[in-house]
């Protein structure tokens, strides 16, 4: 306790929660920790749903037009539980929608952003607690609207997660019902509003509410990742939200933002026209390519903290890591056109997007080499969080290298809309981000709940997930290299792809194993809430501020006023009496030193 009280003064926090009701404390809570946990539990439930949707896709590709065993009749329309061609389109639309908008983005920015930002900067709460509460509850209309679109007859929303017009705008052309696509668009709009609320809160909190002595270059890289992500959201989300409103108006009011003049649908010309389908692509990807970094920059920060802690070494090149995060975010705004190489763009413009896309490899390489530099010569502890973090680095390398292929316009023309794209995307988002999220859950679980997750079960979960992950997604590179198309319910209709069915079946059974493995994680997560080993404030021996707070933290977070004297990565410091050197511990030579502001 001496290290906690040293250099600190008594901290009194007036708690308005003392006499609060259950509803105001745990449902409509304004406490950032409860809101973070609400995001966490919600996204984990949707993660399970997204996994089941993926199995429906994989089953169709492995055993086309056959009954799914056991749950097929319950989940999939059509006689005997078969997946119809139209419903297959709904499946991949909803799988991507759920995983991107309901899992990856909200679990990073919503769950971990909410829970960790005030704790890691030494603040009592977010700058705007009520706005923070609304950022979570604005997700619920999205949950209901997009969930309802899935069950709207006859097939549900089927425009893909990119919702390209004219398919997504002309009701008669959409493979699903007219109302389903509209519900989907309205749901995405609510997700955007929720994210904008969070981004304003995060930026204000990090800039204005840091503890005494917590300069910007004493922030953990997790906070830098969240901060840059919030900036990305604030600048990019309004574009997608406005485009979503425009597409809804095209569908409901007959405006002509995205419908071309003279379009013929079912032997008739729609009333609206004179618009540009490519305009939607530009607006959509102007947000959705930065969104790729919204989905990975916080993960990069969390992995940096975990690797430094369990390598027992300072992070290699702290400032270059910060600058590389900023560089990735900046370049992410000017490369959206590489999603449109096959749209007929001017070759000079295509060359510009190609070169700028390849430039992103430079700051990404800085991060990879700095992670390797941190690991090199360290006293590595192979805990479950460390294993997941190391796998993040290796999977991110594979995903990043495959991305360079797509950055080259001539190559992309061949592999566009093949399974090579699917492989790249899943290596970055599942092999990368999802593995980082698992590591972060195991790492910060003791802080959130005051108990440890079971390490043995955690390692079984890691190894099985790692094996099945690569069995599922690495093979997709091979399929894509021979032109196997995505988004088709029956590619075997073409004789060229008949011989690829055994490979698809192998991938499908790996995917089933990967989803089944998450049952181990769910059991570990839930059972540890009740039977996990109780822990103190700092079970991992880390330096950053959140590990100085009680586990779990009470209302107001800290039972003392934190004062910061150094950065968060001072492992193996010569002045420290142990192998870590908490940010709140004053220098031994001058305990009364005034910290830098």
Image (cartoon, helix red, strand yellow):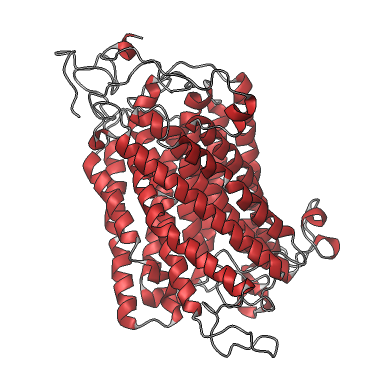
**Residue closer to the observer: 220 or 82:** 220
Please name the residue shown 41% across and 23% down the image: 540
Say above or below: 265 vs 547: below
Residue sitting at the far right: 79
Say above or below: 303 vs 51: above
**Residue closer to the observer: 57 or 177:** 177
* Residue 363 percent coordinates (x, y): 28, 54
Residue 513 is left or right of residue 380, and the answer is right
Residue 519 is left or right of residue 255, and the answer is right
Please name the residue shown 51% across and 85% down the image: 274
Residue sitting at the far top: 2
Say above or below: 516 vs 284: above
Please name the residue shown 27% across and 36% down the image: 315
The count of marks equals: 0
* Residue 249 percent coordinates (x, y): 58, 71
Please name the residue shown 59% across and 37% down the image: 41
Residue 13 is left or right of residue 207, and the answer is right
Residue 336 can be seen, yes or no:
yes
Residue 430 can be seen, yes or no:
no
* Res 339 → quadrant: bottom left
* Residue 486 percent coordinates (x, y): 58, 69
In the picture, the quarter occupied by the N terminus is: top left
* Residue 414 percent coordinates (x, y): 46, 77
In the picture, the quarter occupied by the C terminus is: top left
């Amino acid at each position: 306790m001496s290290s906690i009280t040293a250099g600190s003064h008594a901290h009194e926090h007036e708690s308005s929660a003392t006499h609060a009701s259950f509803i105001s404390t745990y449902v409509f809570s304004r406490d950032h920790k409860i809101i973070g946990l609400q995001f966490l539990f919600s996204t984990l439930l949707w993660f399970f749903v997204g996994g089941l949707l993926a199995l429906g896709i994989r089953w169709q590709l492995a055993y086309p037009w056959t009954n799914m065993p056991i749950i097929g009749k319950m989940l999939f329309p059509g006689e005997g539980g078969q997946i119809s061609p139209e419903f297959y389109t709904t499946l991949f639309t909803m799988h991507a929608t759920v995983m991107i908008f309901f899992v990856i983005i909200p679990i990073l920015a919503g769950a971990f952003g909410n829970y960790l930002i005030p704790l890691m900067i030494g603040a009592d709460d977010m700058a705007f607690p009520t706005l923070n509460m609304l950022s979570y509850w604005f997700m619920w209309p999205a949950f209901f609207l997009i969930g309802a679109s899935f069950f709207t007859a006859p097939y549900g929303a089927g425009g893909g997660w990119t919702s390209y017009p004219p398919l997504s705008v002309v009701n008669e052309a959409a493979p699903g019902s007219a109302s389903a696509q509209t519900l989907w668009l309205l749901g995405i709009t609510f997700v955007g509003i929720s994210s904008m609320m969070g981004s304003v809160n995060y930026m204000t909190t990090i800039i204005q509410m840091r503890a005494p002595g917590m300069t910007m270059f004493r922030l953990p890289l997790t906070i830098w990742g969240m901060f840059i992500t919030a900036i990305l959201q604030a600048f990019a989300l309004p574009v997608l939200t406005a485009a979503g409103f425009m597409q809804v108006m095209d569908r409901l009011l007959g405006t002509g933002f995205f419908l071309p003049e003279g379009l013929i649908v079912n032997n008739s010309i729609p009333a609206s026209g004179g618009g540009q389908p490519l305009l939607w692509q530009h607006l959509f990807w102007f947000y959705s390519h930065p969104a790729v970094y919204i989905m990975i920059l916080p993960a990069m920060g969390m992995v940096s903290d975990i690797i430094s802690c369990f390598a027992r070494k300072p992070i290699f090149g702290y400032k270059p890591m910060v600058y590389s995060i900023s560089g990735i975010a900046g370049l992410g705004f000017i490369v959206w056109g590489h999603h449109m190489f096959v749209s007929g763009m001017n070759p000079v413009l295509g060359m510009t997007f190609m070169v700028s896309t390849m430039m992103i490899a430079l700051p990404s390489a800085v991060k990879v080499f700095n992670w390797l530099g941190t690991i090199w010569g360290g006293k590595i502890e192979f805990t479950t969080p460390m294993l997941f973090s190391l796998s993040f680095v290796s999977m991110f390398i594979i995903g990043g290298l495959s991305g360079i292929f797509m950055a080259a316009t001539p190559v992309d023309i061949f592999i566009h809309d093949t399974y090579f794209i699917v492989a790249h995307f899943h290596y970055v988002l599942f092999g990368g981000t999802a593995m980082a999220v698992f590591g972060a859950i195991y790492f910060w679980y003791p802080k959130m709940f005051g108990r440890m997750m079971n390490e043995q079960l955690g390692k079984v979960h890691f190894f099985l997930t790692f094996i099945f992950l690569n069995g599922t997604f690495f093979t997709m590179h091979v399929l894509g290299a021979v032109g196997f198309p995505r988004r088709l319910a029956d590619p075997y209709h073409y004789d060229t792809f008949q011989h690829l069915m055994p490979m698809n079946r192998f991938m499908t059974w790996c995917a089933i194993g990967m989803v089944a493995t998450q049952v181990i994680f769910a059991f570990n997560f839930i059972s540890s809430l009740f039977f996990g080993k109780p822990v103190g404030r700092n079970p991992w021996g880390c330096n950053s501020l959140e590990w100085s707070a009680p586990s779990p933290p009470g209302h107001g977070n800290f039972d003392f006023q934190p004062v910061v004297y150094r950065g968060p990565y001072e492992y193996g410091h010569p002045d420290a009496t142990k192998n870590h050197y908490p940010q709140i511990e004053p220098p031994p030579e001058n305990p009364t030193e005034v910290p830098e502001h």
